[in-house]
Image (cartoon, helix red, strand yellow):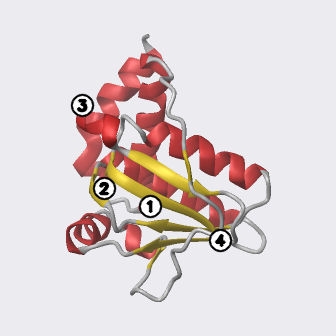
């Protein structure tokens, strides 16, 4: 079984804040379903999110860019919303800080409740196709640059490759 097949996001869309638990890897293969879920919750007026990282084994820059995009969208709301990362762990915290995302969202010290009020539902992750996936990955990396200009040099090759891929399908 591929590693990402064991990975999932479990959600409680009816709680306030909306709770998302990461199970396994959070990466470009499964970030689209989280992106779509957060966008739908925002359309429904949800403005507070908690993400539980206790079972998150690893994450990549695409996933972090999706988080950055969600945090920026929540900041634009009136009143501003919130995205809290709970039970992050040292390795994931290091990745978050290296990209400057700790200044954009809240990294909790352990005080946020992460108990589901209803049985958690796994997010379905449907394949968007190669071009749509490239657009999502490009948007995620552009979010990282928007969050911290220092990320531009880290991802300049990825951005150039993806822009070319999206503009010349």
Q: Earlier in the sequence, mark 2 or mark 3?
A: 3
The part of the image, by quadrant, that contains residue 137 is top left
Task: Say which element carries label 3.
Answer: loop
Gap in Å between the C-alphas at discs 1 and 2?
8 Å
Query: Which residue does the numbered mark 2 point to in the structure image?
Result: 151
Q: Earlier in the sequence, mark 2 or mark 4?
A: 4
Residue that mark 4 sits on: 17
**Left-right relation of 157 to 65:** left
Question: Could you tell me residue 108's position as x and y percent?
Answer: 43, 82
- What residue does disc 3 label? 2
For the question of whether residue 32 can be seen, the reply is yes
Q: Nearer the viewer, mark 3 or mark 4?
A: 3
Q: Report the Cα–Cα distance between label 2 and label 4.
A: 29 Å
- Which badge, 3 or 4, comes first in the chain's sequence? 3
- Helix, strand or loop at label 4? It is loop
Q: Residue at x 77, y 50 (%)?
A: 43
Residue designated by label 1: 147
Label 4 vs label 1, nearer the camera: 4
Where is 80 relative to 25, above or below?
below
Marks 1,2: beta carbons within 8 A: yes
Is disc 4 in contact with disc 1, using a CB cutoff of under 8 Å? no
**35 to the left or right of 43:** left
The tag on residue 104 is none
């Amino acid at each position: 079984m591929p590693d990402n097949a064991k990975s999932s996001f479990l959600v409680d869309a009816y709680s306030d804040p909306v709770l998302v638990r990461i199970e396994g890897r959070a990466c470009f293969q499964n970030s689209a379903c989280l992106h779509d879920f957060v966008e739908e919750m925002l359309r429904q007026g949800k403005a507070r999110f908690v993400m539980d990282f206790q079972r998150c084994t690893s994450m990549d820059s695409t996933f972090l860019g999706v988080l950055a995009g969600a945090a920026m969208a929540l900041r634009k709301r009136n009143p501003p919303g919130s995205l809290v990362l709970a039970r992050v762990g040292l390795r994931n915290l290091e990745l978050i800080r290296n990209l400057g995302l700790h200044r954009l969202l809240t990294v909790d010290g352990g005080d946020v409740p992460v108990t589901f009020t209803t049985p958690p539902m796994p997010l379905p992750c449907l394949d968007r196709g190669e071009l749509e996936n490239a657009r999502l990955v490009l948007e995620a990396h552009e979010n990282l640059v928007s969050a911290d200009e220092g990320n531009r040099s880290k991802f300049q090759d990825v951005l150039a490759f993806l822009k070319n891929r999206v503009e010349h399908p």
